[in-house]
Image (spheres, grey):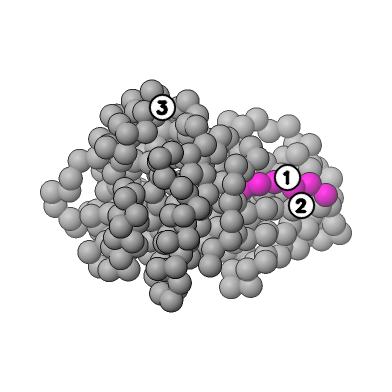
Amino acid sequence: MIEEIGCGKINLALAITGRRDDGYHDIDTIFQSIGLHDVIRLEEADEFLLTCSNSALACDETNLAYKAYKALLPYRRGPKGVRIHIEKNIPVAAGLAGGSTDCAAVLRGLNRLWRLGLTTEELCRIGASIGADVPFCICGGTMRGRGIGEILTPLPPLPPRPVLIAHPPVPVYTGKAYSLFDTTPRLQGIAVDEAAKAVEAADFEGLEAHMGNTFEELVIPDVPMIESCRAMLRRQGLRPLMAGSGPTVFALVPPSASADDIYRAVAAEAKDRGIDVYISSLVEGNGEPYEENDGI
Ligand SMILES: C[C@@](CO)(OP(=O)(O)O)[C@H](O)COP(=O)(O)OP(=O)(O)OC[C@H]1O[C@@H](n2ccc(N)nc2=O)[C@H](O)[C@@H]1O
Ligand SMILES: Nc1ncnc2c1ncn2[C@@H]1O[C@H](COP(=O)(O)OP(=O)(O)O)[C@@H](O)[C@H]1O
């Protein structure tokens, strides 16, 4: 049996830069792995079986872990049975790449289990055909993503700063969120270059000054719960930003503040509103998560 860790991600900056002829959108983003992670266990078996600790998640052909398995079948010469179990900690459809990271973990894991010898570049090419965020999730860490998110340039790892995460119980559909871009004129620019320079200098103040996400302008007006989450984080002196297409909101916690105290204050406020709150951390690559805890 082997185990893979699938870390979630946030986008420290995200600009949608245009619509492509294939209906997808070009983006310029800074992906960052976080310690909040799923655990994926893989072992040889007589036939294929996919299970998940979250019974609300379908374990059929729509599951991104299943799609990863299917995509690697042509590379496998021996028996094709395998048992895959997903221990789900990352909230689903949250903007934290929970599905993409499971997909990436299965690609990495089967490559190991079946000794396929595929390179990271080959895994990323296969992953990109399943989902735009999958190549980043294969690599992890801190990376600039262009194209549909699959053209990756590594950035130096940031120190493991705590990150507060608030996930409101409202659905946001990524495809629909992107399509709002096509019908919304005059969107604000996002300073991804400046944010990337701040990351290179490990300058958290500069980074926070330039963090931004085009999706905030597109999605938040129709989803008041996201604005409530942002207000909750602002009341703690934090600078909130939406993760990906939402609805999750995150904020970096400065060293001058106690991450535990802030977590407790936000969790108390969130308790009766169905909002899950997590304290996690920025992590390097797909290495050992620095810290994580359960939502309330
Ligand atoms: C918005 C982002 C930002 O990191 O993250 P999430 O909010 O999903 O976490 C990603 O671009 C999401 O990537 P991912 O979730 O892998 O997207 P996919 O499954 O490939 O695509 C879902 C749908 O989103 C749209 N899509 C996706 C990526 C992209 N660059 N342009 C698009 O227009 C397409 O309509 C597609 O059908
Ligand atoms: N293993 C999986 N984990 C989470 N979601 C999955 C998985 N497989 C398929 N999905 C589907 O993928 C969609 C996006 O989920 P997810 O990757 O968690 O969110 P996001 O793309 O917003 O970061 C959801 O509609 C979910 O049902």
Q: Does the magenta stretch include residue 3?
A: yes
Residue 66 figure quarter? bottom right
- According to the picture, the residue beneath numbered tag 2 turns out to be 42
Estimate how packed mark 2 is, as few (under 14), some (14 to 19) or many (20 or more) residues with alpha carbons within 10 Å: many
Mark 1 vs 2, N-terminal side: 2
Image spot of residue 266 (x, y percent): 42, 61
Question: Badge 1 is on which residue?
Answer: 110
**Is 107 in the magenta?**
no
Callout 3 secondary element: loop
Q: Distance between the residues labelled 3 and 1?
A: 35 Å
Q: Looking at mark 2, is its residue's CB closer than 8 Å to ligand 2?
A: no
Q: Is residue 32 above or below residue 97?
A: above
Residues at discs 1 and 2 in contact (Cβ within 8 Å): yes
Span highlighted in magenta in the image? 1-7
**Looking at the image, which residue sits at the far top?**
201
The numbered disc on residue 286 is none
- The amino acid type of the residue labelled 1 equals Leu
- Residue drawn at point x = 58 percent, y = 31 percent: 121
Of the residues shown, which amino acid type is indicated by label 2?
Leu
Q: Distance between the residues labelled 2 and 3?
A: 37 Å
**In-image side of 52 versus 177 (left or right):** right
User: Disc 2 on helix, strand or loop?
Assistant: strand
